[in-house]
Amino acid sequence: MATVTLQAQTYNDSVRVRTWSVYMQGGISSYHGVRSELFDNSKRTMAPDLNLGVKYNIQPWVRLGVNAGYTMLKSSGNHSLSITTTDHNFLIGDRTGTLELKSDRLQNLNNTYLAGVDANADFNILEIWPKRKAQWLSLYAGAGVGYMRGWNRNSQTWSYNERATATGDAYFNGYSHSYLKSSEDKKHFNALYIPLSLSLEFDIQRQLTLGVIGQYKCIPTKSDFSPKGIYSAGVVIRYNFVKSKSKLQRKQIADLYSELDASQVDCASAKATLQRQSREEMERLKKEADELKRQIESINSTAAGKGEETSAIIYFENDSWELSSKGGEQLQVLAEKLKTHPEKKIMLISSANTVGHENRNKKLSSNRLNTVKQFLLSQGVSDTQFKTEVSLGDYGMTTSSDCRRVIVITQP
């Protein structure tokens, strides 16, 4: 009878083995160590951080991905710089005086827009315990390498105050002028970066995952206006391209029916094979029986025709091939006669009664024949004197104890 079983898949097997997912990540970011004096003494502010990407789960403990991200670097610095200059040859009308110019930077705004793409690998730390029950929870540590391009826009507003006087013995001239001036400068840079991340993710459903992530981008490339590092925090929404629970159950049921159908075919095939083997075994046994019958008839006819005599009948205990003391005495007497008549030939016919299994009886019959032969050899009978050896098993026998025997026939 065939047994059909449906192997249970773990949650990780169906969700995180050779599966794809896409995600969206949003949060805030900040930075440190911008390589430009325009950011010195400036107040850093938080900026939006957005990412889109795709992941491929190789196994529950590792996944590969590609990420595209956008973020900003923002800073503002008010009244951060004041400069005073003088000009002693400034003309006021037709008189020469001293001009004092005081410049105050009222505003220093920096907005740097960053867009980058990176390839990364994530490792699920919780898979250190692969048989854990909470497989819907994952803690990923990730690293990778990427390339980013940045666009910096610096805008400044200055206030200027000019004052000058020209004095003499008979005159006094004064001059005063205040005004504002704004400027804007744009730069760009390219840089490699190394993203490092740690994310805690929860599978709300098989197809939907929510999580929180912390990330740090190390920027070793020393490009103007590039920061040394960017750190961010946010939330992750992920869609997993896997079958829903209901579809998975339907597939498992379909697989079970398929296995049942296959098992029925296997059962039919096995039944046909057993029937064929049974027929072959019956034919083989019939041939063996016919051959034994032929041997017995041949032995009987030969013995009758040549005047052969039964020299000894050695009986054995049930389920045994050990020689009894009486059997040993019979064989000793026979061995002495055979040694004095080396021209005589020996025929051995062994059998077992029908008690027990057929194969066991065959073994008993064969071992009894071998026991008698080995005893005669040990008593000095020549191996060349043994002409015929027939082991009948339980063929043609009954349950009688007289069937547990070896018949020794000598031929002139």
Image: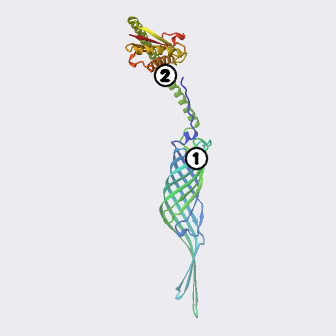
Amino acid type shown at disc 1 = Ile
Q: Is residue 62 visible?
A: yes
- SS state under label 2: helix
Q: Quadrant of residue 344?
A: top left
Q: In front here: 330 or 35?
A: 330
Residue found 60% across the figure and 70% down from its top: 78
Q: In front here: 371 or 36?
A: 371
Residue found 45% across the figure and 18% down from its top: 376
Horizontal and vertical percent for residue 346?
41, 14
For the C terminus, the quadrant is top left
The circle drawn on residue 128 is: 1
Q: In front here: 73 or 172?
A: 73
Q: Give the residue furthest to the left.
A: 343
Mark closest to the chain's N terminus, 2 or 1: 1
Horizontal and vertical percent for residue 138?
59, 47
User: Which colour scheme appears in the figure?
Assistant: rainbow
Q: Quadrant of residue 34?
A: bottom right
Residue under numbered circle 2: 270
Contact check, label 2 and label 1, Cβ < 8 Å: no
